[in-house]
Image: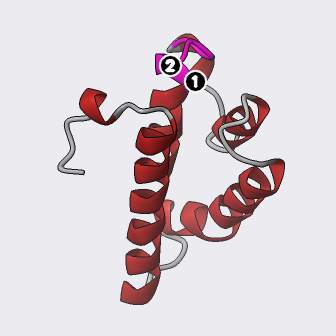
Amino acid sequence: MAVERSIQFYLLHRGHASGEDLRYEHTAVYQQGAEVNLFSEEFADRLTQLWKQNRAEVYYRETVASAEQADAMLSLADAVHRYILDYASLQHECVCSQ
């Protein structure tokens, strides 16, 4: 969810989407990020596959994430968040401790 929210923040801030546009399925935000050249199509596809294979199962409690998986997801979310803030020069817009 944190990865999606960081991408949504970028899309909203740059005027590539409105709040209404972002009320669709989880993986659509990854494709929209690629469409506006925030990252590559390949990366969007990898995020989509990650969500489909892992996050959805954990979110809906079909399985339990291991501590290792949770740490990996936290690292990914942090890296995506920092990338977006750096890419868009938006550090001043964020209330996180980055």
Residue 1 seen anywhere in this rendered image of the structure: no
Give the distance between the C-alpha atoms of the residues marked 2 and 1, in whole angstroms: 9 Å
Residue 1's place in the image compared with 37, above or below, is: below
Q: Please report the residue visible at 64 percent of the width from the left and 36 percent of the height from the top.
A: 29
Q: Position of residue 57 (x, y in %)?
A: 58, 67
Q: Amino acid at mark 1?
A: Leu
Q: State whether residue 86 is above or below residue 76.
A: above
As drawn, 29 above or below 60:
above
Q: Is residue 73 left or right of residue 11?
A: left
Q: Which quadrant would residue 52 be assigned to in this image?
A: bottom right
Give the extent of the magenta segment. 11-18
Write the residue at 48% across / 65% down: 76
Q: Main secondary structure of the magenta part?
A: loop
Badge 1 crowding class, 10 Å Cα cut-off, few under 14, some 14 to 19, many 20 or more, is: some
Depth check, front residue: 48 or 98: 98
Give the residue pinned by disc 2: 12
Disc assigned to residue 22: 1
Indicate yes or no whether the magenta region holds residue 40: no
Asked whether 62 or 74 is in front, the reply is 74
Residue at the spot 74% in from the left edge and 62% down from the top edge = 46
Q: Position of residue 68 (x, y in %)?
A: 42, 88
Q: Residues within 10 Å of mark 2 (few under 14, many from 20)?
A: some
Horizontal and vertical percent position of residue 38: 65, 38
Instruction: Tell me whether the residue at label 2 lies in contact with that at label 1, contact meaning CB atoms closer than 8 angstroms.
Output: yes
- For the residue pair 39 and 73, the one nearer the viewer reads as 39
Count of numbered circles on the image: 2
- Picture quadrant where residue 45 is located: bottom right
